[in-house]
Amino acid sequence: LQAYLSAHAERYRQPETITFTHVFFSTRARSPDEARQLATAALRTLNAEAVPFAQATRFGERFAYQVNYVERMRDDIAGHFGTAMADALFALTPDASTWQGPFGSPHGSHLVLVTQRTSARDPALSEIEDRVRVDWLAEQARRRKEAFIERLLDGYTIDVDPALREAAP
């Protein structure tokens, strides 16, 4: 199983994740500059009052998706905030006491409190042994089936009518 895992490591690699909460200011009824100005003012308040993760909902506006994102992958974040903001968030150093931003998305301006970021990693076999075993067994079954079909076909000679051969494109 370890050899199979090593040969297929990319299949089992666990992607980097991030945990954060955000405060949102929409550009739906205001310009991006106005949203950014509101976010900048709120940033000062959030940091001055040391607003924790759990109290983020007291600030900003309702966001179409979520307020808290726990152990989410880059693609998930990009789907809600756009690739540029996802890249910016994954570049931040987690700090549970400092709000950062503003960051722009297609929806508006965001302030974020990033509490955790995990790097992509290759898990040990002991963590995913059941999954690797299922995949290895499926591959063994597929190989046995292919070998059986090959042996079966080896017992036959296939003759194609010359008229059919000429008619083929």
Image: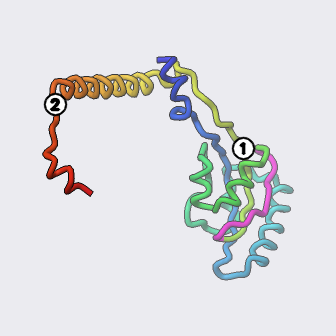
Q: Which residues are magenta?
A: 95-107
Q: Is residue 104 magenta?
A: yes
Viewer-side residue, 164 vs 72:
164
Residue 75: x and y, percent?
Answer: 58, 52
Of mark 2 and mark 1, the one earlier in the sequence is: 1
Residue 82: x and y, percent?
Answer: 64, 62
Name the residue beneath numbered marker 1.
115
Name the residue beneath numbered marker 2.
157
Residue 25: x and y, percent?
Answer: 70, 70
**Which residue is at a point 30% across and 25% down the rendered structure image?**
141
**Which residue is at a point 16% across and 43% down the rendered structure image?**
160
Q: CA distance from mark 2 to mark 1?
A: 67 Å
Q: Is residue 147 magenta?
A: no
156 in relation to 166, above or below:
above
Place residue 46 in its image quadrant: bottom right
Viewer-side residue, 18 vs 53:
18
The label shown at residue 103 is none
Given the image, on which type of amino acid does mark 2 rest? Thr
- Neighbour class for label 2 at 10 Å: few (<14), some, many (≥20)? few
What scheme was used to colour the molecule? rainbow
Viewer-side residue, 166 vs 123:
166
* Left or right of 83, for residue 46: right
Secondary structure, mark 1, is strand
**Which residue is at a point 66% across and 50% down the rendered structure image?**
54
**Which residue is at a point 66% across and 45% down the rendered structure image?**
18
Secondary structure, mark 2, is loop
Residue 36: x and y, percent?
Answer: 78, 71
Given the image, on which type of amino acid does mark 1 rest? Thr
